[in-house]
Image: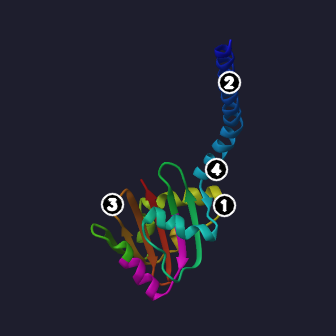
Amino acid sequence: MRERTVIIGLAAAGLGVAAFWSLVLYVGAPMTWRYLKAWSEPHELPLAKIPSEFRTITGQELPKKADGLRAIFQGGMDPEIFVRFQTDAEGIEYVKRSFMIAGATSEHIVAGQLRQTPSLMFSSVPPMQEKLGICLFDQKSIESGLLIESPLLKHRFYSVLIDEQRGTVYIYAILL
């Protein structure tokens, strides 16, 4: 009799635990799914989150001077970030040193050249901007600058465009 009571008690406890976790999954899974779906959609990052997300995806730090810093972030399996900021000559040199790694290519772009042969990486920025109703990058406004593109290294790939006339830096990066 006593063994039977213990078995019934354990079975009841097991059913209670199963019912609890079923309820947690029933209530929590849709909320988690909505959160993950929203996180994986492009969105503008709050200023406080930009440095950490930038560091995670690029493996680099932002320069000390990054005025007007704004970023579009898209999470998911291959998170990507697009940042824009204004900086001084020291900041531009810092960006060049940080992103001109072994195997990276650089090309000076002159008036109209970027419009004719846009970087493949920057081609995904306009759809994200359109979806959000913001404009951080207008390819037609760039008269000249330096385009740096990395090789695929440590599962990271990025394109950097430095508008040296305006001191504006555009960086698009993806973590594969």
Q: Is residue 117 visible?
A: no
- Between circles 4 and 2, the one closer to the viewer is 2
Quarter occupied by residue 144: bottom left
Q: Please, is residue 46 above or below residue 145 in the view?
A: above
Q: Residue at x 66, y 35 (%)?
A: 25
Residue position marked by numbered label 2 in the rendering: 15
Mark 3 nearby-residue class (10 Å; few <14, some 14–19, many ≥20): some
Quarter occupied by residue 5: top right
Q: Residue at x 64, y 67 (%)?
A: 46
> Three-letter amino acid code at disc 3?
Leu
Mark 1 nearby-residue class (10 Å; few <14, some 14–19, many ≥20): few
Q: Position of residue 176 (x, y in %)?
A: 41, 53
In the rendered structure, the answer to whether residue 98 lies left or right of residue 141 reads left
Tell me the CA gap for discs 3 and 2: 50 Å
Circle 2 SS class: helix
Identify the mark nearer the N-term, 4 or 3: 4
Residue position marked by numbered label 4 in the rendering: 38
Q: Residue furthest top?
A: 1
Identify the mark nearer the N-term, 4 or 2: 2
> Three-letter amino acid code at disc 2?
Leu
The region drawn magenta spans 82-97
Q: Position of residue 56 (x, y in %)?
A: 47, 63
